[in-house]
Amino acid sequence: MPIEGEIRLQLEWLKPDVIQDEFGIESTVLIFGGARFPDQKIAQDKLNSAKQLLAECTYDANLLRKCRAAEHVVKNSRFYGEARELAKKITNPVVVHATNKTSNLT
């Protein structure tokens, strides 16, 4: 890589730090994840629908598979709520202390 490309890459990495310094941001949180699981009520409604369809046609392998998948989604949908709680805690208003440090209200 030519020297110009290396410098450009370093500047791209440095830019977020410079901007955060300008705004007095001392730390950040980065959370990796996905949006695979819905809210618990939505997941439960889908499971109830799948169970109702399965009750009407008990020998349908496709419906049985859908019902089992819906049960799995309900089980894991608690993570949706936990992620929302974490987001609330992270984005709580900050308090500026006399030492000029900031911390979240928890």
Image (tube, rainbow, N blue to C red):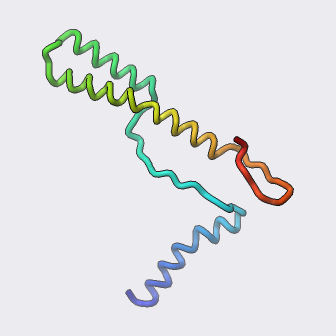
Q: Is residue 20 above or below residue 103?
A: below
| In the image, farthest residue toward the right | 98
How far from the left and from the top, in percent, is residue 6?
45, 84
Q: Is residue 95 above or below residue 100?
A: above
At a point 40% along the width and 35% down the height, the residue shown is: 37
How far from the left and from the top, in percent, is residue 92?
68, 43
Q: Is residue 36 above or below residue 13?
A: above
How far from the left and from the top, in percent, is residue 43?
39, 26
At a point 35% along the width and 30% down the height, the residue shown is: 73
Quarter occupied by the N terminus: bottom left
In the image: residue 94, left or right of residue 11: right
How far from the left and from the top, in percent, is residue 15?
58, 72
In the image: residue 65, left or right of residue 21: left
Looking at the rendered structure, the number of numbered marks drawn on it comes to: 0
At a point 24% along the width and 26% down the height, the residue shown is: 66
Q: Quadrant of residue 77?
A: top left
In the image: residue 80, left or right of residue 15: left
Q: Quadrant of residue 5?
A: bottom left
